Amino acid sequence: MAEREVDRSVSQTVKAQLALRDQILSGALRPGERISELQAVETTGASRTPVRMALVRLEEEGLLEAIPSGGFMVKAFSERDISDSIELRGTLEGLAARFAAERGVSARELEPLKECLAAIDELLGQVPISIEAFSSYVTLNARFHALLTELSRSPPLVRQIDRASALPFASPSGFVMAQSALPEAQQILIIAQDHHRVVIDAIENREGARAEAIMREHARLAVRNLRLALRNRTHLDLLPALALIKTATD
Amino acid sequence: MAEREVDRSVSQTVKAQLALRDQILSGALRPGERISELQAVETTGASRTPVRMALVRLEEEGLLEAIPSGGFMVKAFSERDISDSIELRGTLEGLAARFAAERGVSARELEPLKECLAAIDELLGQVPISIEAFSSYVTLNARFHALLTELSRSPPLVRQIDRASALPFASPSGFVMAQSALPEAQQILIIAQDHHRVVIDAIENREGARAEAIMREHARLAVRNLRLALRNRTHLDLLPALALIKTATD
DNA sequence: TGTATGCGTTATGTATACAATAAACGGAGA
DNA sequence: TCTCCGTTTATTGTATACATAACGCATACA
């Protein structure tokens, strides 16, 4: 046996999955590129079995695509794939918000969301917003969306929203990051924050339709601004942007 | 090596996945039950590696749940999980219908859908509907929904809808089957068929909002009737019903 | 010169052996 | 008799060997 350094604190499968995801998101593996198992074994430090398990998981996650003749390749996404994914996610979050409103949420359950809201308000108070504050915003925003999703009390829906977020740009953190280069960034964040406030209000008042509508609008804002960001920075390759997101959210 | 009968026409992984799914859907493996790899190896005829791959895929599919200490168990679903999944699916199909309407669909692309429609009309002409005709209906209905989904021209959305259908009752075939025991079954099918007709019309006339609304209504009909079916047959355990569906759709 | 065929190389699919961990059982002590 | 701890056993996680199929290259023939 090769003197492989084995880290026992985490399973080899998980280790391999994280390592490979990193490689994909960082652009080390380019879209369309075939992934060699042996190469993956070398770069991840795991052996072939866990590597294969990781590859299967990443395929189900949507980052990889099975090649009919065998093996996997990194999936390539068009701009439209990504904007569709954002809208898709918004639709699901809309459903979650409606469920929350219709099923009722206690004041106690809304507390953490309001804390998020307040924390974001504080960040947005700074003009102009610093890069560190922006990074905090990304984290808080992701937390807000996760908490909101949970309010639906619907495990299948929560699961589906998690899956829909696999495409990184579809995540709330993702689109926000894409906008960060724009001078209008702060205005966008202020509008998004208003959406957050409205959805909470709608849920408190048990207005399901309103809660749903605002989340869908929230996603449409994201799509519009993704388009804007891509237009303003024509050189912005999606993949490096993904790497940026990863750094910011970790 | 044991004299294992190896079927080379299909990969062992796929074979194991199909076999295990059958076991879950047929009720041979009950919800909450832990799946033993060794047992799965015996029942599927594949060896441990492909069995494990199949287990990972089924987990991602939502039929299995990973046990923290290792291994997998069959996931259990509440009635609400299932009705939520149906509504979830309806929401996604609504988005697909809207995309189709907004993005435009040629008459040629609508042709197969209209053929489906006509074939279903013919089946519904019989009063009362026979069990064989009902079985054909289930197949045609599933085909209609699949074709409709494709019209969205959005790979991420198609993928997500496929995933949402993993919970068998969430599939159009599923809920229909659950209703089959009811005397009102035929009336329900007639209403559903009307929905199908309306969504085609809306797409043809590029009325995105109307196309979306009718698909969501379609799902709500399904939820109402699932509830009704479950109430009328209190002894109806969900799992045996799944077995019924499987038989009908194969 | 272009194409087709065959062989060799390489990578994937599969099987199984080994290691490590968690559960179950039994025994001993309070 | 109940509880706690140790041992045993079973099951999962990992590694690797083997089989098989695909790809590429080279050579020969048209």
Image (cartoon, coloured by chain):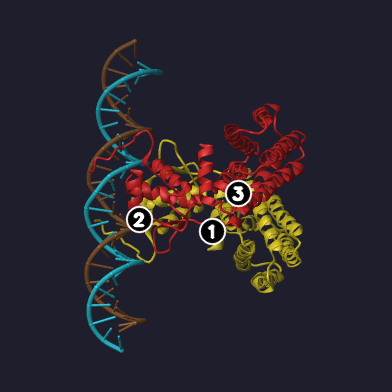
Chain colours: A red, B yellow, C brown, D cyan
Left or right: where A128 falls relative to D7? right
Name which of mark 3 and mark 1 comes first in the sequence: 3
Q: Secondary structure at mark 2?
A: loop
Few, some or many residues within 10 Å of mark 1 (<14, 14–19, 20+): some
Which of the 4 quarters of the picture holds residue B118? bottom right
Give me the residue at 77% from left, 39% from top: A207
Q: Quadrant of the N terminus of chain A?
A: top left
Q: Residue beneath label 2, please? A: B46
Q: Which residue is mark 1?
A: B246
Alpha carbon of mark 2 to alpha carbon of mark 1: how far? Answer: 23 Å
Name the kind of residue labelled 3 in the image: Leu
User: In the picture shown, does residue B240 fall above or below A201?
Assistant: below
Three-letter code for the amino acid on which mark 2 is drawn: Ala
Residue nearest the viewer, comparing A181 with A56: A181
> Mark 1 falls within which chain?
B
Q: Nearer the viewer, mark 2 or mark 3?
A: 2
Query: Which of the 4 image quadrants contains residue A128?
Result: top right
- Residue B68 disc label: none
Mark nearer the N terminus (2 vs 3): 2
Residue B181: x and y in percent read 65, 57
Residue A199, x across and y down, in percent:
72, 38
Badges 2 and 3, same chain: yes
The amino acid beneath tag 1 is: Lys
Q: Which mark is residue B236?
A: 3
